């Protein structure tokens, strides 16, 4: 039995394991696009190399879109569907040591967390990191481990819904990433130089055979790449991401369960970390409206009803996600700085009210860009 025959045999065993548990066979629905894709005249495939129920905190996002998760789509369409019929299709992941990255299924993973909580494992098909060409005789060619074909497979296997096509920023990110993997774009640009405008049309035709057909749109994408203005990709911040940040920094996670068994997080001022002598909260930074309503007004109300006195020290640590985050690190850090200044300003207000013992002491900024330059960090105020 040759290597590819063995891979197909094992693949079927993993699919059988999943279907015996009530999940759908990915070869019989639209998930098949994850395993087979075309690039020009050639056809390729990836293999299912495992099936497992994996803990959410071991799964990390790796989306080809600028927006990793469309929460409105999940809330209005996917979550009601899963509640009614159950999760039918396992997500696809690739193993990286002890952790896994999502190749396809970001919305299913997000929706599953919302419905079942982060303590319910996620059903996953483990996908091969390599790609094989499908030969004319139907057999599979040698394993190809280069990033270029794998990234093409991700673009192909994450097809946009009809009302949510790829946007120009998606294309800019894809093309920059593909060129970094292979400057020749699979041999299309022989010398590996930055493509001319005419060559660029050929590249777009190769990568997006059905998208970006309008000449003006192609020119805008080309000009943006020529100027080097391609931005980083935004990363959504999930419930489990927040939990991981808090664990990493040594804080109580505030995770509790409702009577129905759903996972939730304690509310601000109820969420006390006695070990670190702080109160914690999770919120968003925007123009300041949400922050002031959810945190500052809550503190003022507690001062008014006597829940907060003038003697006890109250240090507040806020895990803060920037709402409508910029896609460049410089601009994102400016948004964060504006929020830090607002929190320092409120510390002055508390002091003027006669509560110098009350203050926002730290803010935790989660990673919101895919770029390695952006990492979770904590700022003392």
Image (cartoon, rainbow, N blue to C red):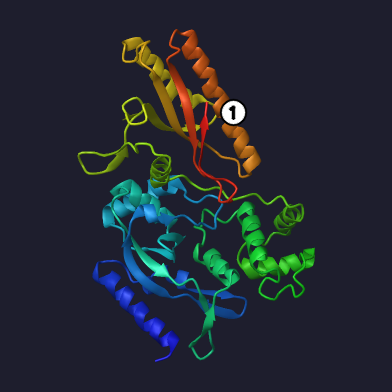
Q: In the rendered image of this protein, does residue 308 appear above or below residue 73?
A: above
Point 40% across, 49% down: residue:
74
Asked which quadrant contains residue 146, the reply is bottom right
Point 33% across, 69% down: residue:
51
Of residues 39 and 128, the one drawn nearer to the viewer in this rendering = 128
Q: Position of residue 18 (x, y in %)?
A: 29, 69
Q: In the rendered image of this protein, does residue 222 appear above or below residue 46?
A: above
Q: In the rendered image of this protein, does residue 304 appear above or below residue 262?
A: above
Q: Name the residue under label 1.
A: 338
Q: In which quarter of the image is the N terminus?
A: bottom left
Q: Is 185 on the left-hand or right-hand side of 309?
A: right
Q: Which residue lies furthest to the front in this view?
A: 275
Q: Position of residue 178 (x, y in %)?
A: 64, 64
Q: Is 269 on the left-hand or right-hand side of 174?
A: left
Point 42% across, 25% down: residue:
316
Residue 133 seen: no
Q: In the rendered image of this protein, does residue 57 appear above or below residue 43?
A: above
Of residues 354 and 6, the one drawn nearer to the viewer in this rendering = 354
Q: Position of residue 201 (x, y in %)?
A: 72, 66
């Amino acid at each position: 039995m040759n290597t590819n025959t063995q891979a197909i045999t094992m693949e079927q065993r993993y699919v059988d394991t999943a279907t015996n548990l009530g999940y759908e066979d990915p070869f019989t629905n639209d998930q098949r696009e994850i395993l087979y894709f075309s690039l020009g005249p050639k056809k390729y495939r990836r293999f299912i190399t495992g099936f497992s129920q994996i803990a959410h905190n071991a799964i990390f996002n790796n989306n080809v879109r600028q927006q990793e998760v469309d929460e409105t789509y999940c809330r209005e369409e996917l979550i009601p569907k899963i509640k009614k019929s159950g999760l039918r299709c396992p997500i696809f992941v690739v193993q990286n040591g002890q952790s896994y990255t999502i190749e396809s299924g970001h919305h299913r993973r997000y929706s599953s967390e919302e419905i079942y909580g982060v303590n319910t494992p996620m059903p996953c098909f483990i996908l091969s990191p390599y790609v094989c060409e499908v030969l004319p005789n139907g057999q599979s060619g040698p394993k190809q481990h280069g990033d270029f074909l794998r990234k093409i497979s991700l673009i192909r296997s994450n097809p946009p819904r009809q009302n949510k096509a790829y946007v120009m920023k998606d294309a800019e990110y894809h093309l920059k990433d593909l060129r970094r993997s292979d400057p020749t774009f699979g041999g299309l640009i022989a010398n590996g130089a930055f493509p001319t405008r005419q060559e660029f049309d050929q590249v777009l035709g190769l990568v997006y055979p059905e998208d970006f057909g309008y000449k003006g749109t192609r020119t805008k994408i080309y000009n943006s790449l020529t100027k080097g203005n391609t931005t980083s990709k935004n990363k959504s911040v999930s419930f489990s991401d927040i939990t991981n940040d808090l664990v990493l920094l040594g804080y109580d996670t505030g995770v509790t369960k409702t009577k129905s068994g759903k996972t939730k997080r304690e509310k601000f001022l109820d969420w006390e970390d006695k070990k670190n002598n702080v109160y914690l909260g999770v919120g968003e930074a925007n123009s300041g409206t949400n922050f002031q309503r959810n945190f500052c007004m809550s503190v003022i109300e507690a001062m008014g009803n006597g829940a907060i006195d003038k003697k006890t020290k109250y240090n507040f640590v806020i895990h803060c996600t920037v709402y409508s985050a910029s896609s460049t690190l410089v601009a994102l850090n400016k948004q964060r700085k504006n929020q830090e200044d607002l929190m320092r300003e409120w510390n002055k207000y508390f002091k003027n009210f006669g509560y110098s013992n009350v203050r926002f002491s730290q803010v935790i900024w989660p990673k919101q860009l895919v770029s390695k330059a952006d990492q979770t960090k904590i700022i003392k105020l």
